Amino acid sequence: MDTRVRLSSNNKFLNIFTPLSLSIFFIFYIIEFSEELKTGTPLVVTIIIGIILLLTIINGFKDNNEIYYDTDYLYITRNKETIQIPINNVQNINWTTRKQKILGIFLFYLYEINYLNNNGINSEISFWIGSDSSKIDDFRNTILNRKK
């Protein structure tokens, strides 16, 4: 039985839903304003700006980490590689001032975890989480209980 608790938001949802919804919005925008844009420079510029915006957003979510923990380890998964950090090496978790609303409904906050990596070097990892702060509180309690 796997006792890992997911700390980060479901990145697969963000990686698929955000670009897909923006692409659909952009297609409807072009269809709706195609008469005003006509052909030529305004249409090409609009398409280029839309593609650049979409690629920027996709790139931002691509580097997002998946973070799990249990009573002994913090697990950081990125690019299909999982790193195990002993809970005793986790120094703190901080909420940054960055937040992002998706479609004006879903609010995500950026958190940072400071820890000593397996080489004894101070490191930090960032991740997005929805408005459910109970996960963060449970993780803080796990860290505090483990350090006693």
Image (cartoon, helix red, strand yellow):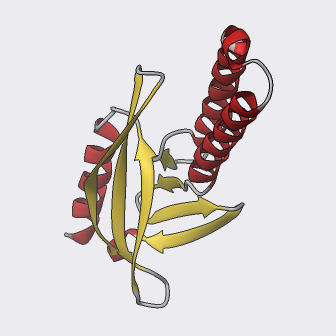
Residue in view at x 50 percent, y 53 percent: 68
Q: Is residue 109 left or right of residue 17?
A: left
Q: How many marks?
A: 0
The image quarter containing residue 129 is top left
Residue at (47, 72) in percent of width and height:
85
Q: Which quarter shows the N terminus?
A: top right
Q: Residue furthest right?
A: 39
Compare residues 18 and 11 and report the one nearer the observer: 18
119 vs 109, left or right, is right
Looking at the picture, does residue 117 appear above or below residue 76? below
Going by the image, does 106 lie left or right of 24?
A: left
Q: Position of residue 143 (x, y in %)?
A: 28, 62
Q: Residue at x 44, y 46 (%)?
A: 128
Q: Nearer the viewer, residue 77 or 14?
A: 14
Toward which corner of the image does residue 125 lie, by quadrant?
A: bottom left
Residue 25 point in image, percent of width and height = 63, 19
Above or below, 17 relative to 45: above
Q: Nearer the viewer, residue 137 or 126?
A: 126
Q: Which quarter of the figure is the C terminus placed in?
A: bottom left
| Spot occupied by residue 28 in the image (x, y as percentages of width and height) | 69, 14
Tell me which residue sits at (26%, 58%) in the image.
Answer: 94
Q: Quadrant of residue 51?
A: top right
Q: Position of residue 20 (x, y in %)?
A: 69, 28
